[in-house]
Image (cartoon, rainbow, N blue to C red):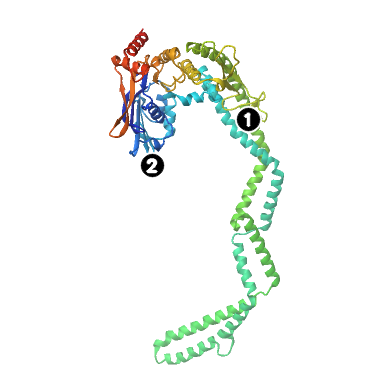
């Protein structure tokens, strides 16, 4: 139950705080005083999208806050507990709307999300206004109303669960079947690629080794000339480096007898001569092994070109080519198992199909029975609301599907959706002798308001929402019809907290609590205020609603009589 509403810097509201009670609360006021703004604020607190344009001119932010008393056994209490809050502390929802569009939501003082607020608000309160009236013209809502009326929501949800189990399996089966249709061609391609890679017998680092060998073969002549010249300079020609080192060593050997300090130098030169002699022998061996093999050159170039081709096709390196071979082998294994997987999927889908069809058919039968009862109850309620003689029929039917999306979601020429097999449509004939036609085609604003109220009255005992706000309940009605609407709201208030915004005194007189919303201009700014009307002042407010600006003794007497009749 909504116990308190606080609004700051929102549209033309400066700072407003309202304390609500149970039963039927009436909000009245002149046109443009801000009644619709209060409804907008409540919608935002129940999860509507915020817009910075709603912030009062000159303010950086708007703040909305609502305090709800939560019944311990309610669905809302369970959801609050699941989100980590203590239901016994009540529920405080706060929204801050920023002109930078960085809006914030707080639940019981903790920063929260729109998703969390939406889950909580689903069973917290509902606003029956122009939006709901227009929604009633869409037949998508009609099926949900039938299910709510008959208590079939859990059964519909089970159908929905099966539906969402089946959908991904259908998609998977379609993908596997498509693969199976193309598997012969694909298998041939994979086998060709596999053979191509295996036949290549690639070795890690082989391409680098071959590149080096290719470079040597292409430059074999230059290498040979350089080695021959180097060998001759070091060892093979008269006056070669080794010969010079030996002569220098001998000369130093002689004088080392004079100065022993030169002995290490002699040894060093002797060692160097030996080292250069060894290098010369190694160069000669290297020279004898230099290949001038054009055939080997061609083989290497062909091998490298084949490796480059495989690298271009399969990833840029020998390692990636080998990795691709492993991928190919896995795909070939999957192709071999594809028929087995398809059969397994079909078996699973057949099983789920039998379950969803059985549940959908049972749900359909129960809906048809409920539709007859709901039709009778709506006609009875509409008769109370001065629409006697109106025929109202809830039509339940299964639309034919020419191209079913899947045989696993199809029976009797109809497709199964997450809501089952059925569609529902409200049919109405407001006047005797007229044919039944869809509600969307013929209902006037006043008739639509009464149909909404009739449905609310019927669903009251099944509806888990504790607070209902009526904003457009008096659209297109007046006189004795308004009187009956007021009585119906009073009846509803036995099951729910009812907050009703109205222009009609015939409705307002039934309120257990009454607030007046007014608009004032102060210091060049317009601001909305709301004040509770004491019981002894309600006569004047009803008189204003009856007679407008000029309140006469006659209108005051009329208003007093209306309140007296309500109490009786």
**Which label belongs to residue 100?**
2
Q: Residue at x 34, y 39 (%)?
A: 60
Q: Percent x, y for residue 214?
A: 63, 69
Residue 225 in sight in this render: yes
**Which label belongs to residue 258?**
none
Residue 482 located left or right of residue 335: left
In the picture, the quarter occupied by the N terminus is top left
Residue 20 in sight in this render: no
Quadrant of residue 536 within the rendered picture: top left
Q: Identify which residue, 461 or 191, lies in the foreground.
A: 461
Residue occupying the far top of the picture: 568
Other-residue count near label 1 (Cα within 10 Å), few / some / many at <14 / 14–19 / ≥20? many
Q: Residue at x 56, y 31 (%)?
A: 164
Q: Percent x, y for residue 490?
A: 40, 14
Q: Percent x, y for residue 166?
A: 60, 31
**Which label belongs to residue 349?**
1
Q: CA distance from mark 2 to mark 1?
A: 50 Å
Other-residue count near label 2 (Cα within 10 Å), few / some / many at <14 / 14–19 / ≥20? few
Q: Nearer the viewer, mark 2 or mark 1?
A: 2
Residue 51 located left or right of residue 373: left
Residue 307, above or below 176: below
Quadrant of residue 280 within the rendered picture: bottom right
Q: Residue at x 64, y 78 (%)?
A: 221
């Amino acid at each position: 139950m909504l116990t308190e509403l606080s609004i700051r810097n929102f549209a033309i509201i400066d700072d407003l705080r309202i304390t609500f009670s149970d039963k039927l609360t009436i909000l009245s006021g002149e046109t443009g005083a801000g009644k619709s703004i209060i409804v907008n604020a409540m919608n935002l607190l129940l999860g509507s999208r915020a817009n910075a344009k709603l912030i009062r001119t000159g303010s950086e932010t708007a703040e909305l806050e609502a305090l709800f008393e939560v019944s311990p056994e309610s669905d809302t209490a369970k959801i609050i507990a699941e989100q980590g809050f203590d239901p016994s502390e009540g529920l405080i929802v706060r929204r801050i709307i920023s002109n930078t569009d960085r809006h914030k939501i707080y639940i019981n003082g903790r920063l929260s999300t729109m998703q969390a607020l939406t889950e909580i608000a689903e069973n917290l309160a509902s606003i029956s206004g122009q939006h709901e009236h227009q929604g009633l013209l869409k037949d998508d809502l009609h099926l949900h109303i039938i299910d709510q009326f008959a208590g079939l929501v859990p059964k519909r949800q089970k159908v929905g669960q099966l539906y969402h189990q089946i959908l991904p399996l259908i998609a998977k089966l379609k993908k596997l079947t498509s693969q199976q249709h193309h598997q012969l061609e694909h298998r041939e391609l994979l086998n060709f690629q596999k053979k191509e890679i295996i036949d290549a017998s690639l070795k890690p680092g082989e391409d680098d080794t071959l590149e080096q060998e290719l470079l040597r073969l292409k430059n074999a002549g230059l290498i040979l000339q350089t080695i021959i010249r180097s060998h001759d300079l070091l060892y093979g020609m008269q006056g070669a480096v080794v010969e010079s080192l030996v002569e220098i060593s001998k000369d130093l050997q002689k004088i080392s007898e004079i100065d022993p300090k030169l002995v290490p130098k002699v040894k060093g030169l002797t060692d160097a001569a030996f080292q250069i002699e060894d290098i010369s022998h190694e160069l000669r061996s290297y020279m004898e092994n230099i290949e001038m093999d054009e055939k080997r050159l061609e083989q290497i170039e062909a091998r490298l070109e084949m490796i480059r081709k495989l690298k271009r096709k399969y990833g840029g390196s020998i390692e990636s080519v080998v990795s691709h071979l492993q991928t190919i082998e896995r795909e070939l294994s999957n192709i071999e198992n594809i028929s087995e997987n398809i059969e397994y999927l079909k078996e699973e889908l057949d099983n789920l199909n039998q379950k969803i069809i059985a549940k959908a058919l049972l749900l359909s039968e129960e809906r048809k029975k409920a539709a007859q009862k709901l039709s009778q109850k709506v006609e009875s309620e509409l008769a109370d609301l001065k629409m006697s003689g109106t025929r109202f029929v809830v039509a339940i039917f299964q639309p034919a599907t020419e191209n079913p999306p899947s045989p696993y979601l199809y029976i009797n020429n109809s497709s199964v959706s997450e809501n089952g097999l059925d569609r529902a449509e409200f049919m109405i004939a407001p006047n005797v002798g007229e044919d039944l036609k869809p509600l969307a085609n013929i209902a006037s604003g006043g008739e639509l308001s009464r149909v909404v109220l009739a449905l609310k009255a019927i669903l009251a005992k099944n509806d888990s929402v504790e607070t209902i706000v009526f904003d457009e309940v008096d659209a297109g009605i007046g006189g004795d019809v308004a009187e009956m609407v007021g009585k119906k709201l009073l009846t509803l208030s036995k099951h729910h907290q009812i907050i009703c915004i109205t222009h009609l005194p015939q409705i307002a007189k039934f309120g257990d609590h009454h607030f007046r919303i007014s608009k004032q201009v102060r210091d060049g700014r317009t601001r909305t205020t709301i004040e509770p009307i004491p019981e002894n002042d309600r006569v004047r407010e009803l008189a204003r609603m009856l007679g407008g600006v000029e309140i006469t003794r006659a209108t005051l007497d009329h208003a007093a009589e209306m309140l007296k009749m309500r109490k009786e």
